[in-house]
Image (cartoon, rainbow, N blue to C red):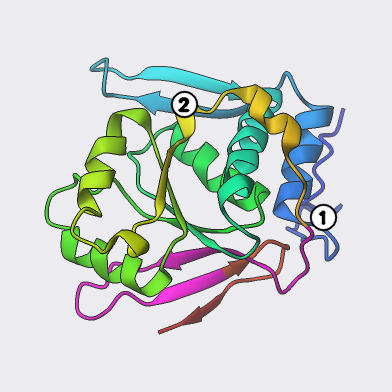
Amino acid sequence: MAFDNPFLDSAGHIKFPEDGSIVGHVEGFAQSQGESLAYRFLDFSTERDGAYIDITWAQFGARNRAVAARLQQVTKPGDRVAILAPQSLDYLVAHFGALYAGAISVPLFDPSEAGHAGRLHAVLDDCQPSAVLTTTDCAEGVRKFFRNRPPKERPRVIAVDAIPNDVGSTWIEPVATKDTIAYLQYTSGSTRAPPVCRSPTSMWPPTCCS
């Protein structure tokens, strides 16, 4: 039986539905393929050979809606939401949770990583996030990172793994067009201020600028 992939045409070429959005497609998979594996993360922090951590489409959708609903309580559509967390499934949920909220995700990294504080401050000064998504283990370090900023310039810090799924009952699906920005992707900025690419929530290609 042939596998039905909405992103491939009959010849196997990649196609992007013009009327589709990232949130719409993920929600579609969450509803239609709930028990299927969505993502598998190989975690080396607890075992030398790595431990598999799985999440199904139904679980993924529930986590996304919960994070989004929490964000919708403290942000408005189009606000920037930075992700300051280590690699994990929580990072992925943070990114998609921001998209589900109608916010602009800014995927970054855990501020405890050595040697990157200057770049991180430069990016945060540029994007000016209204909220920061992190994990419970990293939340205190993230708050310390913003401690020297004036109180009005400190974004709300939210630990995604501390948000219960039932918060998602208040989620309101955002309205997106081909011009709606999904996330900002900053480069390394090793020789100058980090340039950024803007990626839309639709299936249209990203736009890069300095």
Q: Quadrant of the N terminus?
A: top right
User: Which secondary structure, mark 2?
Assistant: helix
Disc 2 residue type?
Answer: Ala
Q: Which mark is residue 11?
A: 1
Query: In the displayed structure, does residue 127 sit left or right of residue 199?
Result: left
* Above-or-below relation of 178 to 143: below
Q: Quadrant of residue 43?
A: top left
Labels 1 & 2 near each other (Cβ < 8 A): no
Residue 65 % position (x, y): 67, 36
User: Which secondary structure, mark 1?
Assistant: loop
Pick the front one: 58 or 122: 122
Q: Is residue 149 magenta?
A: no
Pick the front one: 109 or 56: 109
State the residue position of label 2: 162
Q: Quadrant of residue 188?
A: bottom left
Residue drawn where x is 65% and y is 50% of the image:
101
Residue drawn where x is 54% and y is 72% of the image:
198
Residue drawn where x is 70% and y is 22% of the image:
36
The region drawn magenta spans 175-198
Most extreme residue toward the left is: 115
Residue 111 % position (x, y): 23, 49
